[in-house]
Amino acid sequence: MTGDLRRDMLAGWEAWRLSRHSFVPAPRTSPARWRTMSTAEKAAWDLARAATHANLPRWERR
């Protein structure tokens, strides 16, 4: 998606909706692995998890 298309606008939403299945969600991790992650790794994992697990399909038109 280009920088000029925003998901909060209809054209941007449609572009995102049609291409969203190309996203790869953050991998699952165990509590043991979580404890061994550095602060930077935890921050990157949290960001990827939040970005790929958003509850956006509720906005789809049926």
Image (cartoon, rainbow, N blue to C red):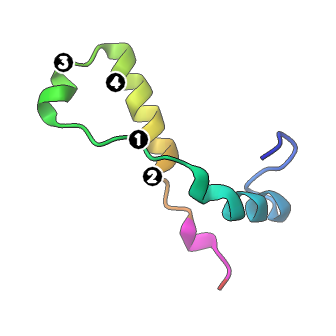
Mark 4 vs 1, N-terminal side: 1
Q: For the residue marked with disc 3, what is the amino acid? A: Thr
Q: For the residue marked with disc 2, what is the amino acid? A: His
Cα distance between the residues tagged 3 and 2: 23 Å
Q: Is residue 57 above or below residue 25?
A: below
x and y, in percent, of residue 61 in the image: 68, 80
Instruction: Residue under label 4, please give it.
Output: 42
Q: Nearer the viewer, residue 22 or 3?
A: 22
Instruction: Residue under label 3, please give it.
Output: 36
- Most frequent secondary structure within the magenta stretch: helix
Circle 1 crowding by C-alpha within 10 Å: few under 14, some 14–19, many from 20? some
x and y, in percent, of residue 2 in the image: 83, 43
Q: Is residue 12 above or below residue 62?
A: above
Please report contact status of discs 1 and 2: CB closer than 8 Å, yes or no. Answer: yes
Residue at 68% across, 64% down: 17
Q: Residue furthest bottom?
A: 62
* Numbered circles on residues, count: 4
Residue 34 shown left or right of residue 47 in the figure: left
Residue at 18% across, 27% down: 33
Residue 17 shown left or right of residue 43 in the figure: right
Please report contact status of discs 4 and 3: CB closer than 8 Å, yes or no. Answer: no
Cα distance between the residues tagged 1 and 2: 8 Å
Cα distance between the residues tagged 3 and 1: 17 Å
| Residue range corresponding to the magenta coloring | 57-61
> Within the image, what quadrant is residue 50 found in?
top left
Cα distance between the residues tagged 4 and 1: 12 Å
Q: For the residue marked with disc 1, what is the amino acid? A: Ala
Circle 4 crowding by C-alpha within 10 Å: few under 14, some 14–19, many from 20? some
Instruction: Residue under label 1, please give it.
Output: 26
Residue at 47% across, 36% down: 48
Q: For the residue marked with disc 4, what is the amino acid? A: Lys
